[in-house]
Image: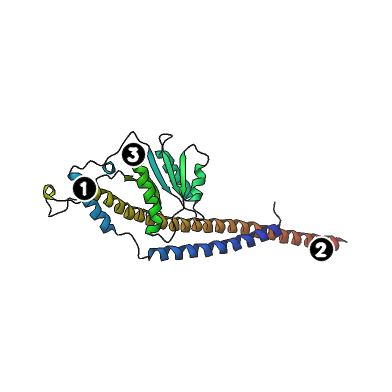
Amino acid sequence: MPTIAMLKQDMESTKSLGDIVDVLKIAALMQFHAFQLKEWKPKQDFLNIAEDIFNVLVSKGLEHPFLFDRPTLPSLIVVITSDEGFLGDLNMLAINAALNIVKTSEDHVLCLGRRGARYLEDTDVSYKVFPGVSSEINTDELEPLKLYILNGYKKKFGRVYIIYPKFISLAVQKIDKVLLLPYQKSSQAKILRGFFIDEMLIEPAISHVLEMLIEIYLDFRLLDIFWMSKRSEYAARIMHLEGSTQELSTLNQKLSFNYFRQEHALKDKSIREISASKVISGRR
């Protein structure tokens, strides 16, 4: 059983650790709100318009690798993890979701984030590591990933999935799976109003327009996913720290209870010893 001195020291250590966690939680909340106010959020309007244009091209009967699956080729699975602290559980969930897609030894995983890639070291999966998503998301950061995806898809992959933590609310994050390529016609997509598809003139060529549109579409799609995953990171860190605060509070209550119980026992023992001493002295 720990002594009263040890219990007091543990209480002080727990309180100090709790103060540190509270500071980290406040900092995480400030980062989350600052990130929310960024002006470079992806514009959903563009993605909606791009889907409408893709719908037109598909309706023109265009046959292009960007528009259909090639089942004989392996898959590329892009998984977004974080190099920030307190996100081990989120990283593991994302990696497990990526591994669930791997079906053959030729399937390849591209992991964004070195900490997440550690979970792949003990597997037989072929993988490559890219830097994690930074808080300053921009097109320069997206470009290497986009080129890797496009070049890989053109040469050896039949489809490209991306796994990322999707922000639902501050308390809820969900690991989401998206098929980036080939492009799939959305059930929500509309034919552009006011145009007769058979009479449309697309120059210089439909295939060239499609390839350029795919690059622009991927820029915005990846930006949207990066934005969502970064929000999830901040939210997950806040909730992890909140959980740590509650655990430390529970631990501190238990230590306080044990401390005061032992202190009371020592005082009670001292009173009994003094009383017994007086009784013995009176008999003499």
Q: Position of residue 80 (x, y in %)?
A: 43, 50
Question: Is residue 185 left or right of 14 when viewed as pictured?
Answer: left
Foreground pick, 33 / 99: 99
Task: Bin the neighbour count of mark 2 within 10 Å (Cα to Cα): few under 14, some 14-19, many 20 and up.
Answer: few
Give the mark nearer the N terminus: 2 vs 1: 1
Question: Is residue 250 left or right of 232 when viewed as pictured?
Answer: right
Instruction: From the image, state whether disc 1 or disc 3 is nearer to you.
Output: 1
Give the mark nearer the N terminus: 2 vs 3: 3
Q: Name the residue beneath numbered marker 3.
A: 158
Three-letter amino acid code at the position of disc 2: Lys
Three-letter amino acid code at the position of disc 3: Gly
The answer to whether residue 42 of the structure is visible from this angle is yes
Q: Residue at x 37, y 47 (%)?
A: 149
Q: Disc 2 versus disc 3: distance between alpha carbons?
A: 92 Å
Give the structural element (helix, strand or loop) at label 3.
Answer: loop
Instruction: From the image, state whether disc 2 or disc 1 is nearer to you.
Output: 1
Give the mark nearer the N terminus: 1 vs 3: 3
Q: Name the residue beneath numbered marker 2.
A: 278
From the image, which quarter does the C terminus lie in? bottom right
Tell me if residue 97 comes above or below residue 2 in the rendering: above
Task: Bin the neighbour count of mark 3 within 10 Å (Cα to Cα): few under 14, some 14-19, many 20 and up.
Answer: many
Q: Which residue is at the far front?
A: 204
Task: Bin the neighbour count of mark 1 within 10 Å (Cα to Cα): few under 14, some 14-19, many 20 and up.
Answer: some
Q: Position of residue 70 (x, y in %)?
A: 31, 36
Q: Name the residue beneath numbered marker 1.
A: 206
Classify residue 8 by image quadrant: bottom right
Three-letter amino acid code at the position of disc 1: Ile
Question: Is residue 283 left or right of 146 when viewed as pictured?
Answer: right
Q: Position of residue 10 (x, y in %)?
A: 65, 58
Q: Disc 2 versus disc 1: distance between alpha carbons?
A: 106 Å
